[in-house]
Image (cartoon, helix red, strand yellow):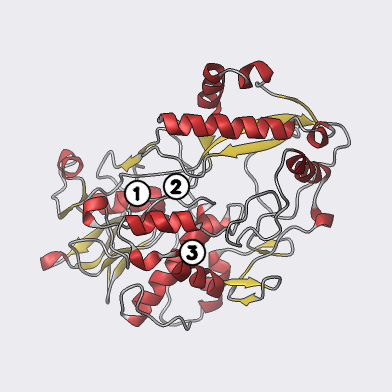
């Protein structure tokens, strides 16, 4: 499938919707079951709090979070909240409180109408540091190793070499970090040998790739429905008219995908395979999700601002087979890729340990969405930043995750 990637300073946080939702207790339980006892809910909750600057919640971290206020909402969004109440969803103001489920404004990384990316918070204020050098417009080919599998640096696609003083930390995302490791000889042995790459470590790099599948329900707004949006400054693609609707996302899918290199050439993108709705559990979840979304759009509040839905009607929603066909024909990606360099015990498909260190190597870590043990029940960005903050402390303090100072 085609997988757009953020190729700029700040990564996905510089182009995505900026949603700052935390992972759930159930997510943390899954992570613990995979051997990550240091990533319990209480521990990660503390990290989120130190990151967030949310005047409403009283936190004073470095990264600002705001929510849309009622006066920023357009007519369609207001109707959405009323429609959700019609079908039984409670209003939620603070989604990051434990156990919240309902409808309301998502917390986003912004100040007024200005996006705030990870680069805005963590890189640009430190550009004057003599110890910081930011190189753009480059592609990393592979990691270099000395004896005993110690990472010594990286080789760029143009042949230049950069030596590491202490560690190499790969942060190219859940699609491209596996490719760098695979070209370096870390991955499934059969894949490496197929491309004449000498194996360094046999690990399931590129497996367990996950995403949040989305089935969109789309309708045309009625004349005068006020389709304005709160200020987020996002652009999903060129459009020639207004459409509105609901994205029916599966936030806990059970399918497993892969991202594997097809060549040793660092300029060639890997092949990404994602078996959306490939399991009976996911198809059942999709049917339930779409039926809920359909009911919401058919609510009196939403019908007052939307015309007929495109491509779906009562007869489809009422038939399991027809609804499966609709879901499979319309499912798309949310681009929330994760878990392809899974943090887990070796016996549970792990690539890195709880501190992000690649197994059977020294001086090599991965720190991005690829190490999240299982995909969180929310947008990935904020969870990824939490992982980065926690592993960053570990690197700074020279201690394993779970044994470090919380002071910045």
- Residue 252 visible, this angle: yes
Q: Nearer the viewer, residue 197 or 130?
A: 197
> Disc 3 versus disc 1: distance between alpha carbons?
17 Å
Q: Residue at x 25, y 60 (%)?
A: 143
Name the residue beneath numbered marker 1.
Answer: 340
Front in this rendered view, residue 260 or 328: 328
Query: In what element is the residue under mark 3?
Result: helix
Q: Position of residue 163 (x, y in %)?
A: 26, 70
Single out the residue that lies furthest toward the left: 147
Task: Give the vertical position of 257 relative to 342 (above or below).
Answer: above
Using residue 240 as the reference point, say whether residue 167 is left or right of it: left
Q: CA distance from mark 3 to mark 2?
A: 14 Å
- Residue for point 58% across, 76% down: 61
Residue where numbered disc 2 is placed: 337
Classify residue 254 by image quadrant. Answer: top left
Disc 2 versus disc 1: distance between alpha carbons? 8 Å
**In this picture, residue 190 sits left or right of residue 254:** left
Against 42, is 90 above or below? above
Picture mark count: 3
Which residue lies under the disc numbered 3? 385
**From the viewer's perspective, is 117 left or right of 363?**
right
């Amino acid at each position: 499938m085609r997988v757009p990637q953020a190729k700029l300073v700040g990564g996905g946080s510089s182009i995505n919707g900026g949603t700052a939702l935390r992972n759930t207790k159930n997510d943390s339980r899954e992570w613990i079951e995979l051997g990550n006892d240091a990533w319990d809910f209480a521990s990660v909750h503390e990290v989120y709090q130190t990151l967030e600057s949310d005047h409403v919640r009283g936190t004073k971290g470095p990264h600002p979070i705001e929510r849309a206020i009622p006066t920023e909402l357009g007519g369609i969004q207001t109707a959405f909240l009323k429609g959700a109440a019609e079908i039984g969803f409670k209003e939620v103001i603070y989604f990051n409180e434990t156990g919240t489920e309902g409808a309301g404004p998502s917390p986003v990384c912004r100040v007024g109408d200005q996006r705030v990316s990870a680069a805005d918070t963590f890189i640009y204020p430190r550009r004057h540091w003599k110890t910081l050098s930011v190189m753009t417009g480059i592609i990393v080919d592979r990691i270099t190793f000395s004896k005993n599998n110690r990472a010594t640096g990286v080789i760029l696609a143009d042949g230049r070499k950069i030596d590491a003083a202490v560690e190499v930390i790969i942060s190219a995302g859940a699609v491209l970090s596996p490719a760098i490791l695979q070209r370096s000889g870390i991955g499934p042995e059969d894949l490496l040998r197929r491309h004449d790459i000498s194996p360094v470590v046999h690990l399931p790099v590129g497996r367990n790739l996950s995403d949040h599948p989305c089935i969109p329900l789309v309708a045309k707004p009625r004349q005068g429905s006020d389709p304005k949006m709160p200020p987020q400054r996002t652009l999903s693609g060129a459009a020639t008219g207004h459409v509105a609707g609901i994205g029916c996302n599966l936030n806990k899918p059970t399918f497993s995908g892969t991202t594997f290199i097809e060549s040793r050439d660092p300029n060639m993108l890997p092949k990404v395979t994602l078996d959306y709705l490939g399991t009976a559990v996911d198809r059942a979840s999709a049917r339930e999700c779409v039926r809920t979304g359909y009911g919401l759009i058919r609510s009196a509040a939403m019908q007052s601002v939307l015309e007929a839905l495109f491509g779906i009607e009562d007869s489809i929603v009422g038939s399991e087979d027809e609804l499966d066909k609709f879901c499979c024909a319309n499912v798309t990606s949310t681009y929330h890729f994760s878990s392809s360099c899974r943090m887990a015990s070796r016996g549970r498909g792990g690539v890195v340990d709880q501190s992000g260190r690649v197994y059977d190597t020294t001086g090599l870590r991965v720190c991005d969405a690829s190490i999240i043990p299982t995909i969180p029940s929310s947008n990935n960005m904020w969870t990824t930043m939490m992982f980065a903050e926690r592993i960053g402390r570990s690197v700074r303090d020279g201690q394993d995750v779970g044994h470090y100072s919380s002071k910045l």
